[in-house]
Every structure is written in C-alpha cells, then in structure tokens.
Amino acid sequence: MRIRSILGILAIFAVIVAAPAPTVAGEHRMSAVRGIPAGGLRASKGTGNTIGTTIYEKNPRADGYRHIDTPATIANLKAMGLNTFLYDVWVSPKDWDDLRKEFAPAALAAHLNIWVYLAPPSECERRIANGDGNCPRPYKIDYRSWANAVATLSLQFPNITAWAIDDFFASQENRDLFTPAYLAGLRAITDGINPDLGFYSTFYLGNARNPTDLATISGAVDGIIFPYLGYEGNNDTQDSTAVAQQLNDILGFTTPKHLAVVLLIYAGRFLDAPLAPTEDYVGQVMDAAAPYVADGRIQGIVNYGAPISDDPQVNSDDLAPSGNGRLSLVVPRHKPTPTDSYEQGSQQITVDPNASSYQLSFYHYDENARVQAVFGYQIKQALINGTVVWESDVEDDPNYQWAQATVPNVTLYPLLHGQTSATLTFRLLERRGVGDFPIDVGFDNVQTAGMTVPDADFETPHSWTLARTDVSLLPSQDVWFADRPVRIRNAIAARWGGVQQPVSAGPVAPKNLSMYGKGRLKLSLPDQTSTSAGMCTSATQEVTVDPSSPHYELSFWSFDQYFATPSGQGYHAKDVYITNSSGQHLLSRMDVMDDWALWINSQSSWNHIDVTDYLKGQSSVTFSFALCELNGVGDFGVDVGYDNLETIGFQFANPGFETTGGWIMYNNGPLHAEISTS
C-alpha cells in the first residue's frame, strides 16, 4: 500500500492497534503486487472470438437483451479452482451494468476476485452504421472515464482488484493513445481513488522483450499478461516445450522495470493457431509454469478461453475422414522451414515373416490445391524402416479432400519378407525450405495385408511416436472429443484444486463441417468452374416479428476453408441481407479471405448484431444468407457454411439446420445452396 502523507501513517497505526476486521475466508488477501492474490493468480478469461466462455440467460429480459447468467458462470468458474475472473466489458451493451449490479456482488459472496478487462481502440468496431459492435460501453475508448469508474466500483466491491486493457501496442492507433503521459494519467486517476487497484496490459513476446514498449508502461502499469504461443513465430497451441525458455527470457527484461508477469495460456482457440488446444496441452503449459508461480518469479496464470458453458467441441475441428483421430503434420503460417527438415509419426508394426504378399493403404489429406508453380517444396511420404515406399507432392491432389493411396507388394515384399517387426512412418518433408507456406497434412485409416498396425486409425492419443527436426514443424496426433471442453476444465481443476467432471469417449463427429449438431447450411462453388460478377446462391426465410420486443438481435456463425490473407480477396463474399417494407438491405458482408478457416460469430468480432432499425414496426421480414461473387472466377472453389442462428424478437424455423425444412434455396449456375446433414 502506498503511504502518501502523515495521515496515512496514522491510519495504518490505528489499524494495527485495533481489533482485526473480519475477512471473507481470506480470499481477498493480496500479495505485494497489486491485483495478485496471495499464492498467485489463478484466473480465466473469455470472449474475443472464443467459444463457450460466456453463459447467457436463455431468455431476454424486459429490456430485450440476454444478460450474463451470473449464478451459472460463477459456479463453473469456482469448480475449476479459480480465484480470479477477467471480466470482459466488450460484447454487450449490458456488460458493465451486469458487472455492477449482479456479477460483482455475487462474486464477492463466492470469494471470487475480478479484473475488469477492456478492449483497446483497435478492437472497437466504432464505424459500424447500425450500432457499435464490440466496444466497451458506456465509455468506449475514453479510458480516463473507465479508470474513474472501475476504481470507484472497486471501493464498493473489494474483490475488484485490477483492471486491464488488451493489446496496448497492437496498432498504431493504440500506440498513439497509450503514451507514457496518458498511462501515467490513468494511474493517477485510479491511485486517487483506490491506490491498491492493479493495472495490466497484454504484451506478446515481441513487446515483452522490447525495451521501448516496456519503458512506455513502466511506472504506470503493474505488469504484463504474456500470451504463450509456442516457439517464436509458430503461433500454435500444441507445443508446450518453450515455456521455460520464454519466461526466462522475458523476466530478463521485465524484472529491471519492476513489472509483474502473468502467463496467459490459450485454453480455448487462438484464431491464428493451426489446431485447437487440448487438455494435454493446457495441463503441460500449466505444469511448466507452476515452478515460476510457486517461487514468485511470475505472478500467476490466466487460462484464456477456458470453456465454462455446456457446449460441445465444434464438429469442424474433427478433420478425420472417419472416427475421431488422425495424424496431423503442420507447418504454421509465416514460419520459414529449413530445406530437408521434416516432421513425422511412427509406429512399430508386427510383420508376418512368411506372408506371400504385403499391402499398405492409407488416406492422406492436405489444404493445398493443384498449383504447378509451387511443386517440389512439401512432400508427403510413407516409409518402412526409413525407406520411402510412397510419396506425393502436396500439390498433387485437390485441396481439402481425403485421397486413398496404396503401396503394392512389389515395393513392400523386399523390405518385409522374413521380418517379424518394422517401423512404419508417415512424414511431411520440406524438400525445399519455404518462407511462408502453411499447411496441415493428415494421414488416417491405415489398412494392411501381411502386417498389423496398432491404432491404425489414430483414435488413441499418444499411441504414435512423433518427431521433428526443427521447432517450426508441429506434428500431433489430432484426436477429437465431443466433451473436450469438459476435459480442459478438468485439466485446469486438477492443478488448481477444483472439481473433476465425468468424461466419455462420446460420439463420432459428423463429417460435414457443421458447428454443432448434424447439419449446417452449405453454399458452395466447385473447383474448376467459372462464375461472373453478381452471381449469388442463398438460403432465405421469412420470419414473423414480435411487435412487443424493445430490441431485435441476430447472431450467426459462418465458416469457409480459407485463412485470412490479402491474396484472393475481392471474389467471394459471405453476405447477409434483410428485406423489409422499404426494400433489401445488406446487413453484413465478409470476404472469404477476411476471416480465419474457423467458425466465426457473425461479422468477425461483431458478435451479436443489433437489427432493431430494420425490424422495428415490421410485421415480418425476410433474411437471406448468401454466397455472392464480387468478381468472376475460373477455378476458385469455395465452401461457405452458416450455422447456430440465435435471435431476439423473432424466430427462425430450423435455426440450426438440423433438417432440410424451413428454408428456400436459390441456386445460380455452379453456385449451389443446400442443407448438409450427416
């Protein structure tokens, strides 16, 4: 605590000689670092294009909004063993009021601390004509008002122990605002109200080792929240082996500046990561960081995206052609690879030494189309005892499709006859090193004659031996579980004294890339077909509007197979239209190259869309979910999905596309609309 006058000294003396005030089970005892509970921060954080991290009430209240389900949220957070929750004021206009009026007092009673977490200017959708999108309300990017409001609220609720602003230096706009003078002003505001209130920001690896960035915040900010993303530049949520190296490196920069460090682990998806995190990954990173928390080198852990709702794992995360498992060999985005480097999965197999013939077949997959100019870089291989028995360039086959390969007896017999065992390997070889050539190669469904392959379908985690020759390569046995969110919560709870929940093998995921359930809307264009500008395919539905609702809202999830990249923009658009009595209106447009190859809520970071201006006073309106051609193409296939529609003030028939009813499909030449169900 800071002592700024003789009156402060006398006040402390009075506390010492007086009888101690009662506390709430010791939960709000703090360490010497502002905002950090004794024993270290055990926290989670949601929102930000995560899935299953916010629990809303099922029905809107009288104001027309769904509010945060405070009892359910707090119960699930406490079950994981948390002592702190990073509460986002970002998505809903009601976030701040829900915090003040309901969540903060309930969390205080439950002995749960709160950090109020705000978006920076770069993450505020302030230029959207109809509403503000994601931006902390009511004060938006007036962080002086936020400093005053949060500090004042912390006096009423002492479990509000810190506040944080995301990604100080993620954009030039952020840098221009968050100067040393501005940050010092924010600190002065909070110190004048509650000098015990902590102040933090997110610093990625580059910022955390940048003396200029650290000097900018030193003296005003208490510490940094460091997101761990594997080896530098990998941006992955698979590899835990660089935790100690990076923490040691960062501490060399932050310790002289007297800045605390909190490790952020992606327990939910990171949009740029090739694969979603697993329970094993989350546990391994927590274990690697635990000694640093125990001896005070870092001040705690935030599990970002830790799932707290009852939603299952997203179906489209399962890329196996059958079952739930596959071998995945990944090269991350923006990551150079050395020539002749490789990654692989191997298995010891049993061989019949007296077999008259041998056969090996398997399925393989990659994300690249047939592009002649980039042949000769990345090669898929199968090996027996180190000898290549099959290979194929990643450009040989159509993208995003599983193909079967067979190795004949003439190749296998000399290698296997007379043997009782052998090593089978599937490999991705970087025959020529690449600068930025991301890919996810899959192998699955191994079938043999004359030999036996344990776990030939890759259904059991860790049953194959993984290896790589460079840290830029990410081999994994990618096994999907419907209850993965529960498994991740259990991994966290096991390390923080929480409650374990039952798990099961669960169902096999549908193989149609739906988000949830068995169906989705599919709007597609095949490869090697031509279109012209202005062509569209769509699914439409007329809905009845509830005239008594004070607020109307639409939330939808969309998907396409392309990663966000400038190349290829300006051709395919994911459009949503509303037609009311005044005509047709474009509600949302996203280029298929604008977003990630994941299910994204509404228009990127927009989430729930306020459609009140279009529906107020209407008896009915028509919604159209479309794939439209901004410019014609000759060979640029695409698969766009829509799923999991949620509304306020009106209802769709078949909002989850679980049946083929409720929607009118419009095809246009090769552009095709259908409800894909498994």
Image (cartoon, helix red, strand yellow):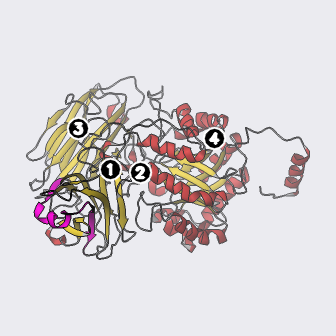
Name the residue carrying label 1: 598
Q: Disc 1 marks which amino acid?
A: Leu
How many other residues sit within 10 Å of disc 3, few (<14), some (14-19) or many (≥20)? Answer: many
Q: Residue 68's x, y, as percent? A: 51, 35
In the rendered image, residue 41 lying in the magenta stretch gets the answer no
Whole-number angstrom distance, CA of label 4 to CA of label 3? 44 Å
Q: Residue 269 carries which label?
A: 2
Of residue 530 and residue 126, the one placed in the foreground of this image is 530
Task: Assess whether mark 2 and mark 1 are in contact (beta carbons under 8 angstroms).
Answer: yes
Secondary structure at badge 1 equals loop
**Vertical side of 385 occupied by 634: above or below:** above
**Vertical side of 229 occupied by 660: above or below:** above
Whole-number angstrom distance, CA of label 4 to CA of label 2? 25 Å
Q: How many tags in the picture? A: 4
Whole-number angstrom distance, CA of label 2 to CA of label 3? 29 Å
Image quarter in which the C terminus is found: top left
Mark found first going from the N terminus, 1 or 3 = 1
Name the residue carrying label 4: 112
